[in-house]
Amino acid sequence: MPLALLALAIGAFGIGTTEFVIMGLLPEVASDYGVSIPTAGFLVTGYALGVMFGAPLMTVLGTRVPRKRMLMLLMGLFIVGNLLSALAPAFSVMLIGRVVASLAHGAFFGIGSVVAADLVAPHKKAGAIAMMFTGLTVANVVGVPLGTLVGQSVGWRVTFALVAALGVIGLAGVAKLVPDMPKPEGVRLRHELAAFKNVQVLLAMAMTVLGFGGVFAAITYIAPMMTHVTGFADGSVTWLLVLFGLGMVGGNLVGGRFADRALMPMLYVSLGALAVVLALFTLTAHNKVTAAVTIVLIGALGFATVPPLQKRVLDHAHGAPTLASAVNIGAFNLGNALSAWLGGVVIAAGFGYTAPNWVGAGLAAAALALAVVSAVLERHDDTPSAVVAGSVADEQRTAVTH
């Protein structure tokens, strides 16, 4: 089982690298194609939208395919998309390549989350999901900084060619290490769709959109923010992304550990602190030391929400969780797309490169409010059952007495 989780983490590493490396290379890509920074930001938005729509589409197409085979097919699609990005002669073609690669993202993490959870005992599910997502977070410590360094040194096209090679390694890892896990008997598409009637599933997805969207509002434009506002040299963006990745690794592991113990309190703390830190980033971005510390905190607090939100979806979509799990991954990227677009809007409006931080703070605060609503509704739903159970117990005690 540990080897299977390692294989999923390898695939996640490649996907995480291609998702995040573009943020450190936006100035280089924009310069090569002769477009503005906000326009280049569409490479982030396009990828995120591709994940959002590709997650349910690819999962539905794979409902009749064994999970291992589907994971392999998704890695193949990922390789093709990154090769297209590396060879793109025009900005529009690169955007298409980003979208093609993104189609594999949501379904891979959605199906992979289900596979990871099925490999361990029920009380360890969030930890197993976090282990798979460790590949995504480690990508921000190793893959993204190295990709940024390569892109700034010898060209961003080389970076995407290397990312395609990572996809080949991920494909081989899944083929070799993930056990054959046939689709559960009796589960049909209508069962998967039924999960979306559960208000708690929908609320968890909305929290996902807003919470992680808050992170991307700031991080999408980290390169121009750090160079134009903070005063870092272009080469410093690499190690700043390492700091962000280290924060993500720590937050992911802490979130996975506590999600199996106190899921909702973990969400309250991480989302509330994230809103505060993002708001403060508007001020801390003007100093190199405080900016660096804030970047670590954003990564940690943002990714501390990932395992608990993914587990909450799986818990409330029990019986047919694959599609809901994949759609929740799409929800992460809907938040990414929304925040990247809003960040570009406020920058283009002349509010400066720190303005997206306020956008992120607002999104995170809205996610916290939804977490409170979700908990209140859950307690309300549980109360009638508790009252009925108590009444039945009282009647039984009375009957025994008499």
Image (tube, rainbow, N blue to C red):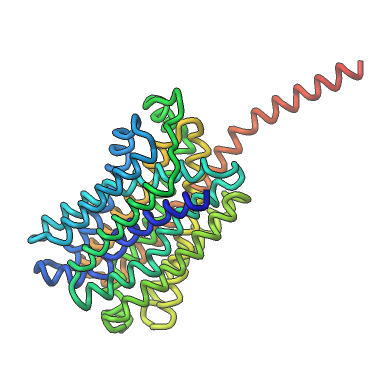
Q: Residue furthest front?
A: 176
Residue drawn at (61%, 45%), measured in percent from left and top?
123
Which quadrant of the view contains residue 22?
bottom left
Q: Position of residue 223 (x, y in %)?
A: 28, 73
Q: Position of residue 138 (x, y in %)?
A: 42, 64
The one of 1 and 386 positioned closer to us in this rendering:
1
Residue drawn at (38%, 52%), measured in percent from left and top?
173
Which quadrant of the view contains residue 358?
bottom left
Residue drawn at (33%, 58%), measured in percent from left and top?
14
Q: From the viewer's perspective, is residue 36 above or below residue 60?
A: below
Which quadrant of the view contains residue 351?
bottom left
Residue drawn at (43%, 33%), measured in percent from left and top?
182
Instruction: Judge left or right: residue 127 versus residue 383.
Output: left
Q: How many marks?
A: 0
Q: From the viewer's perspective, is residue 156 above or below residue 386?
A: below
The one of 282 and 200 positioned closer to us in this rendering:
200
Q: From the viewer's perspective, is residue 119 above or below residue 361?
A: above
Q: Position of residue 248 (x, y in %)?
A: 45, 64
Q: Position of residue 148 (x, y in %)?
A: 28, 72
Quadrant (top left, top right, bottom left, bottom right) of the C terminus: top right
Q: From the viewer's perspective, is residue 175 above or below residue 401?
A: below
